[in-house]
Amino acid sequence: MTTSSEDLKRSAALAALDHVGEGMALGIGTGSTAAHFVRALGARVRDGLGIVGVPTSEETARLCAAEGIPLTTLDDTPHLHLTVDGADEIDPALRLIKGGGGALLREKIVAAASDRMIVIADGSKAVPVLGTFPLPIEVNLFGLGATLREIGLLSAELGLEGPIRRRLGRDGEPFVTDGGHAILDACFGRIPDPEALAATLNTIPGVVEHGLFIGLATQAAIARTDGVEWLPAREANRPHGARP
Ligand SMILES: O=C(CO)[C@H](O)[C@H](O)COP(=O)(O)O
């Protein structure tokens, strides 16, 4: 019997669900893998599990509502126990590229508000070096051309070259995030020093956020045909608010 990629995503989601307990405040991720988690969590909630969730996108909020998962906001619940989310790439140090679904800003805010972040993914997302997946960068619509130029110039100083394109939606129109911003997809290829690139992007005024998640994931559940591999690069329970 063959195992489909959806089966693997579901296996990773179910492995993460084992870490959810009564009374938890959860960050709930976005994307097709996170959707498996939402559906499995919904079934547990209907069986009586008491949790509240903060969704990382309008799409996830709609799915949670359909599953009967009680939702809250970071205004009412600013400290979360655990976030479960997918990723586009995961390296051995648990550094991530996220934002393939365009939700990276809320995903990063929610992950940063959480004691722990479990990344769920099928094996295709585990890479030795980040960068094959184009890096999503959320930018303000004002000054978009100038921001794009600045990203190109500063990343070239780090030895990173390649096209940077404004993302289009399925309808061919420019993609707009839940926060009303644009996404640029930077096709740099290998990113040997993600910390340096993150620090550089953080200095560019029009950049709202970027898809490099560094020091946020505490564990990853990577589902392969022979089972779920956990990457515990660091033990869970990063002190709240402490980031390297
Ligand atoms: O970062 C994300 C959305 O912004 C997703 O978690 C990431 O794109 C993975 O999605 P999928 O599980 O559908 O492959």
Image: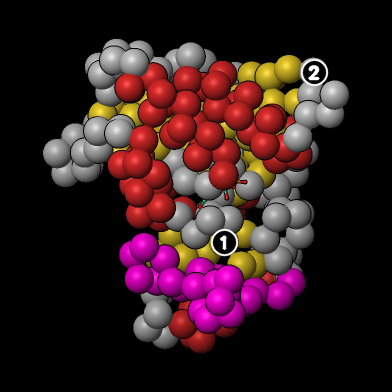
Residue at left 26%, top 19%?
Answer: 50
* Residue 171 belongs to the span the image colors magenta: yes
**Residue 58 vertical position relative to residue 222 in the rendered view, above or below:** below
**Can see residue 149?**
yes
Dominant SS type (magenta): loop
Task: Identify the amino acid type marked 2.
Answer: Asp
Numbered disc 1: secondary structure: strand
Q: In this figure, which residue is indicated by the disc labeled 1?
A: 136
Identify the mark nearer the N-term, 1 or 2.
Answer: 1
Mark 1 residue's CB less than 8 Å from ligand 1: yes
Instruction: Verify whether residue 142 appears in magenta.
Output: no
Image vertical order of residue 191 relative to residue 233, above or below: below
Please give the range of residues in magenta. 162-184
| Residue 214 pos. (x, y %) | 52, 41
Give the Cα distance between marks 1 and 2: 31 Å
Q: 10 Å neighbourhood of mark 2: few (<14), some, or many (≥20)? A: few
Q: Position of residue 234 (x, y in %)?
A: 55, 20
